[in-house]
């Protein structure tokens, strides 16, 4: 008996499902000018988000950054040093509260990082007040930026930002010292892991996909997708079916690949484009290999449905 099987339709459906499930995670990053927010954003997330111009103003002091294809929105809050600080804070509070009431959870702010530079060795009142306001609405992490030598500063931050769920130390870029030694970036993967414990479960996958600092987070996520698909496939194989098991199991495999590639989107999209500049009508049709497998992304080596799509 022949069962019609449209591979293209299966791939499209799997990619659509995986993309729909991905959601959009919203991260608010607060801190004084110069503490290293933009540098941290660019080190942490795909797409050099903080370099994409000015972003969109959402309040007088807050700008929203995003890029097509990356499931994250960054809210960069400046103005901690402004004279009219309490107005800045109130304006931001209203904005966060109105988002929290939005029925669409993709509009909520899911996590806030309050950044304080280690070299300042000071926590200002403005930062304390900011963290108090934010903690009423979202989980807050204190982020000590430009870390080099703690000397008890993390404990001071923990003490002065008691509503922060945790405090992380990061160095977003490599720093070369006069004597030729270099300090490598640090703490970024830990900040990913810590943040993942605090964002709602529904939005974790989006965070995993958007971040580029922790390959482990992507790998762990891929493993859980593979494990789920294996259980589903085993269940199908156990049921006597009037068609070959493969017919039922191939869509599960395609879904699994689409799920994995959607959380590796940043890697795939940063790969040198293999898209042709020729109009699609002039391009050769895409082909599966002789063994039936699909081409692999040159960057992440995933047999990627998203890549297949392109
Ligand atoms: N050494 C070192 N410099 C950093 C680090 N993060 C940021 N910077 C530098 O600090 C300056 C201000 O950073 P920027 O990201 O523009 O700060 P923002 O105003 O908070 O967005 C820039 O010159 C960055 O290169 C870091 O982890 N280590
Ligand atoms: Mg900046």
Image (cartoon, rainbow, N blue to C red):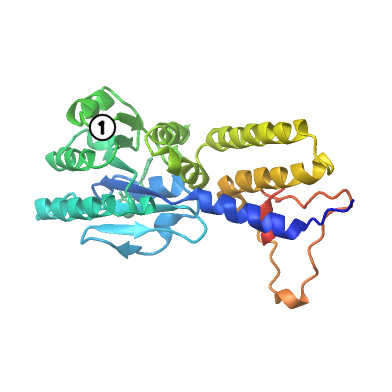
Location of residue 151 with respect to 71 vertically, above or below = above
The spot of residue 124 in percent (x, y) is 15, 39
Residue toward you, 245 or 194: 245
User: On screen, 302 above or below 185?
Assistant: below
Residue 149 visible from this viewpoint: yes
Q: Secondary structure at mark 1?
A: loop
From the viewer's side, name the closer residue of 87 and 224.
Answer: 224
Residue positioned 46% across, 60% down in the render: 67
Pointer 1 residue: 164
Percent of width and height locating residue 242: 83, 42
Q: Nearer the viewer, residue 187 or 241?
A: 241
In this rendering, would 18 be left or right of 180? Answer: right
Residue 195, above or below 61: above
* Quarter of the figure that contains the C terminus: bottom right
Camera-side residue of 268 and 19: 19
| Spot occupied by residue 193 in the image (x, y as percentages of width and height) | 45, 32
Q: Decide if residue 288 is on the left or right side of residue 205.
A: right
Above/below status of 287 relative to 293: below
Look at 70% across and 55% down and name the residue there. 10
Estimate the x, y position of residue 199 in percent, counting from the top left: 38, 39
């Amino acid at each position: 008996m022949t069962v019609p099987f449209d591979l293209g339709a299966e791939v499209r459906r799997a990619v659509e499902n995986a993309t729909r499930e991905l959601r959009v995670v919203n991260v608010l990053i607060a801190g004084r000018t110069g503490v290293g927010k933009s540098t941290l954003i660019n080190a942490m997330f795909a797409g050099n988000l903080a370099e994409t111009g000015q972003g969109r103003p959402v309040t007088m002091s807050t700008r929203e950054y995003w890029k097509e294809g990356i499931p994250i929105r960054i809210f960069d809050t400046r103005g901690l040093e402004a004279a009219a600080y309490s107005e800045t804070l109130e304006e931001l509070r209203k904005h966060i509260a109105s988002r929290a009431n939005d029925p669409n959870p993709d509009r909520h702010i899911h996590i806030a990082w309050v950044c304080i530079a280690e070299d300042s060795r000071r926590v200002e009142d403005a930062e304390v007040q900011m963290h108090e306001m934010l903690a009423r609405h979202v989980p807050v992490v204190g982020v000590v930026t430009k870390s080099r030598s703690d000397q008890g500063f993390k404990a001071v931050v923990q003490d002065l930002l008691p509503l922060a769920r945790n405090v992380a130390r990061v160095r977003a870029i490599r720093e070369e010292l006069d004597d030729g030694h270099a300090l490598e970036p640090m703490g970024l993967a830990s900040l990913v892991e810590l943040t993942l414990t605090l964002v709602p479960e529904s939005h974790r996958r989006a965070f995993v996909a958007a971040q580029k600092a922790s390959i482990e987070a992507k790998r762990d996520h891929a493993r859980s997708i593979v494990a789920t698909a294996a259980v589903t496939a085993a269940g199908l194989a156990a049921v006597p079916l009037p068609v070959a098991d493969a017919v039922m199991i191939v869509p599960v495999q395609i879904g699994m690949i689409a799920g994995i590639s959607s959380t590796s989107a940043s890697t795939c999209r940063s790969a040198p484009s293999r898209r042709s500049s020729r109009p699609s009508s002039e391009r050769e049709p895409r082909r599966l290999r002789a063994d039936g497998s699909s081409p692999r992304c040159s960057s992440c080596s995933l047999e990627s449905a998203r890549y297949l799509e392109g």
